[in-house]
Image: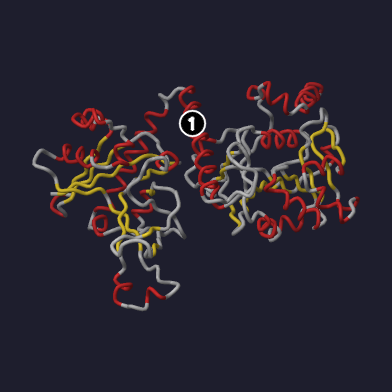
Amino acid sequence: MRVIVLPVCQVELHPHVLLKYDFQISPSSIKSPDVNKSKNAHAHEFYLTPYCSSILSSGSIHTVCEIIKNSIVLRQLFNIQTEDEANIENKIDFKEHGRFIAFGPETDICICALLIPHISSLELNYINQIDPPISRQNSKINYAHSQSPSANKEKMSVERDTVHLWISLNDLCHKSIHIDHILKQSGILSKLSQIGSWIQSYHENTHQSMTTTNIDTTLQLIKARARTLVWDIMEMKNEILYPHPVHGRIPNFRNNPNCSTNLAQLEEFQRARVIEICPSLAQEHLRLFSLCQGKVVLTPAPSIDDAICYKLDPTFLRNHDLARAATKSGAAALGTIVNLTAIGNLHVDIFVVASVIVNPISGARLGKGKGYGDIEYAMMYQLGACNNKTLVVTTVHESQLLNDLPASVMTEHDLPVNVIITPKRIIYTNNTFTRPHAINWNDIDSETMLNLPVLKEFKRIQKVI
């Protein structure tokens, strides 16, 4: 008799499972001696493999404890210290957080599902992993790894990124990813739906008991770790132009001019007359490109008491001034100041907001933590310059996409995105979030009021209205 251990948690709205990762050499690469000479020789694939072991004579629970004890990743997930090894059963509390599912005479396997607190791949990426992580590509999991010239023949150099480790139970049940023969056995996949129901019901029952303070603390921790993860990865992969370090900034990523070319493919851009673009370095080329395309560009004017933005109209700019106008200092020198009472005469067709991280599925995003883009949109919405027809766009590097960024990071005062533009592609998100329609003054601290002096005047105008 064997037991499969499946650590499970809730990511977004769907139950996910963490599997072990093995890799195997495709037989086709062994049969043909010429395969390795081809550019398409990476025929190897990683197969998702469950933590599986024969049940010890001491029982199934003790077997599961031994599996956890011998796995670096599982020890970290369940916070098992050296002093806990002899008492793992009580540490995890199998009665509360474990479910055993047997299959009767159909197979010699039973499943042990272990519920853990919500720990997304953001936290797992900090673990000193011994197993290769996985990545999603076109709803399948394909990995290429090549023979390393400097390595022994028995060792392989695995080309991989630090990416998501959780796999949706729906993906497993629908066989939309590669899985090995253990999970393919008759009846096993159909039983996984029971685990999904258990996870969702558990979270529904426990959600009401969570206090607002704990939720806020958890969200701040998730946001901070997510930002740090992306900043670390982009520095490590040398994807930043300047300045360095990127931490605490909107990433000025390489090949950002390609985003301008991709944005130009949108019909909304071709029809647009007025575009609001954030003042970050990564969007400087986009500002120049938009001006060259005859668009009126708005860019924030944070240091002026009663001005919300600068207006750059290429009709009134000389060609040799366009490049300077696209810079932050050039916009202040060559742009027209638009105060709060005048912005309502304009309609912003496209609003380009800066992001550190964005979820390509839901459209949830995180900036660098100041919330200035959200505030600017809220002011423009209240003053009539933006409405629900305004297309919200962000331009980011592929490394800034994180599809398990939870929806809980978004509040009613955070600005989601409809379209994501990367140097490689255009992504239409399935955005169901509500855009900020007003400023939440309870979230505005003294530092924000100091850095955005226009807020004081805006507050006065709103009181008058």
Query: On the rendered structure, is 245 left or right of 166?
Result: right
The answer to whether residue 12 is above or below residue 180 is above
Q: Position of residue 391 (x, y in %)?
A: 69, 48
Q: Position of residue 222 (x, y in %)?
A: 48, 34
Q: Which residue is mark 1?
A: 221
The residue positioned 64% from the left and 32% from the top of the image is 370
The answer to whether residue 47 is above or below residue 43 is above
- Amino acid type shown at disc 1: Leu
Q: Residues within 10 Å of mark 1 (few under 14, many from 20)?
A: few
Given residues 126 and 425, the one toward you in this image is: 126
Query: On the rendered structure, is 341 left or right of 102?
Result: right
Q: Position of residue 292 (x, y in %)?
A: 81, 57
Could you say which quadrant of the image residue 174 lies in? bottom left
The residue positioned 27% from the left and 50% from the top of the image is 50
- What secondary structure is found at the residue carrying circle 1? helix
Q: How is the image coloured?
A: secondary structure
Count the labels in the image. 1
Given residues 42 and 268, the one toward you in this image is: 42
- Hey, which residue is sitting farthest front in the picture? 150
The residue positioned 40% from the left and 61% from the top of the image is 142
Q: Position of residue 393 (x, y in %)?
A: 66, 48
Given residues 464 and 182, the one toward you in this image is: 182
Could you say which quadrant of the image residue 44 lies in? bottom left
Could you say which quadrant of the image residue 16 lies in? top left
For the C terminus, the image quarter is: top right
